[in-house]
Image: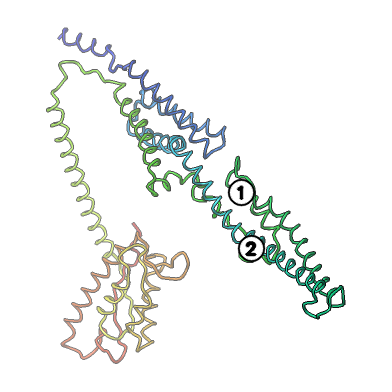
Amino acid sequence: MTNISQRRSSRKNQPQEERDLLLMVVLTFFNFGSGATTILGAIQILPVYLAWTVGGAVQLMLFLLQAGLTAKRTPLRKWLAIIILASASVYTSFFTYYGELAQETNEKRAMDRAIEAHNRLVSEVYTPIKDHLRDLQQEANNQRAIAEAEKQRGITTGEVGYGQQARKLDKLALDKEIKAENFQNTVNELRPLFEYNFEKLEPKDILNNDRKALSSAPQEFRNNYPELKRGDYIDEGSEISLLAPYLKVRNQEEAAFIALLIAVGVDGMAIMLGTAIVTKLVPPEERRSPVAVVGNSIATSIREVRTSFAKVNNAGRESFLAEDEDLQAAVEMVTLNVKGKGSDFLNNFYYAISEIEPHTINYSALTEKYRTDENMHNPIRAFIDKLREPRRAWVVRNNNNTEWVVPPEHYHQLVNWLQKEIKRQKFSEAEMGEEIDFGFGFSELQETPVQFKIPVNPNSN
């Protein structure tokens, strides 16, 4: 006894776990690298001070949790926190890796997009302006040639010299030349606005320059461009920083897949290494073979599953019994004047209720069955009013106050009662059908009173 107690006491004094210091050093380097990419990625979607704070806190907390330095007694919450923090680290690291892998390509693609939009503006606005100038200059030259021919050879009047017709043609040519010269000045002012160097410019700069150029162009030449669309110059989808990983991967960009793989690999490796830092010490006499450990684990799992199923089964059975007792405890006899069988009336109502949430009552379909007799709308409404009384609340209006719905918490109560009441009605109809010609809702020609047993207060417990 003394030896056994001494072994037990010495076991209590021994450390119950040990840490792999070398592995912790490696994990530290992994976390420094992951932390750097996390912060750099967070800077792209958050203010700098917030990115440093949030990114640093995420990585520090990840290291403390993986190294087993905190949350030792709450393993479930610990690993849940690790998964959430690691996901945040992967998400922000994606921006860093993707920026390094695809920055040059994306910048070139963005510039090509903006230049293409600029060239389209030039071809549809500035080129027609230059063509119009060329036409004016050609008209002025032609008119000047005619005026000179009239003056020197009299091609229209036959009189040589600076006569009346020559002066008229000379004035007309002069007007054309002045008009062409004035438009030339306009084109000279527009040229630097449309023809400029793209070097050291970004897409947003090209957009701003083109907006200024378009506003300076004559009105008659910019009918096709009431305003420039920002999306023609800048990829607005890529500007939604928070959705960038999803959008890039969805578009099947190779750089996005590689960036995501690297981010998941680095943080996944850190988590995998973190699971091996802390090792529990098990005395030799308490050690078991791996096969025994696996077998015992499987057996324990099976026992737990069987126990859980048994508890659920018993709870379900008890709830059904309790519900059945509640429904039959106290009832209210409600009499409604209906045409047809009472069981059919309840059947129509039963199938008008949607099986899935929200359990909407198809009131239109319900009344459509009695479209030939509008008086049947009254018992339908009276029946719904009974079901929606506060003590039952089996039927309510939806949030938009547009339809009748059955609350999810009362759906099974209502359908269970409907099934029982339909059976009771059918039994009464079969029992009384041979003794009377109508009644119990037998008559299709006239309204007859039918009694329904509705629970008074099924929600009291």
In percent of width and height, residue 373 lies at: 35, 88
Where on the picture, by quarter, is residue 102?
top left
- Residue 140: where, in percent of width, then height? 75, 67
Residue 261: numbered disc: none
Q: Is residue 358 left or right of residue 151?
A: left
Among the two numbered marks 2 and 1 on one chain, the one whose residue lies closer to the N terminus: 2
SS label for mark 1: helix
| Residue 128, numbered label | 2
In the rendered structure, the answer to whether residue 173 lies left or right of residue 384 reads: right
Compare residues 93 and 378 and report the one nearer the observer. Answer: 93
What secondary structure is marked by label 2? helix
Q: Residue at x 18, y 37 (%)?
A: 301
Name the amino acid type tagged 1.
Answer: Ile
Three-letter code for the amino acid on which mark 2 is drawn: Pro
Q: Position of residue 69 (x, y in %)?
A: 38, 22
* Residue at the image position 24 percent from the left and 89 percent from the top: 438
Q: Residue at x 17, y 35 (%)?
A: 300
Q: Is residue 380 above or below residue 226?
A: below
Give coordinates of residue 94: x percent, y percent. Answer: 43, 37
Other residues around mark 1 within 10 Å, as few (<14) / some (14–19) / many (≥20): many
Q: Which residue is mark 1?
A: 206
- Does residue 36 sit above or below 423 in this rendering? above
On the image, which quarter does residue 259 sit in?
top left
Nearer to the camera, 331 or 13 = 13
Residue 197 vs residue 260, the one in the foreground: 197
Q: Nearer the viewer, mark 2 or mark 1?
A: 2
Q: How dense is the environment of label 2, judged by Cα within 10 Å: few (below 14), some, or many (20 and up)?
A: some
Measured in 3D between alpha carbons, the distance from the residue under mark 2 to the one under mark 1, in whole angstroms, is: 21 Å
At 57% from the left edge and 37% from the top edge, which residue is drawn?
47
Left or right relative to 420: residue 259: right
Quarter of the figure that contains the N terminus: top left
Comparing 61 with 70, the one in front is 61
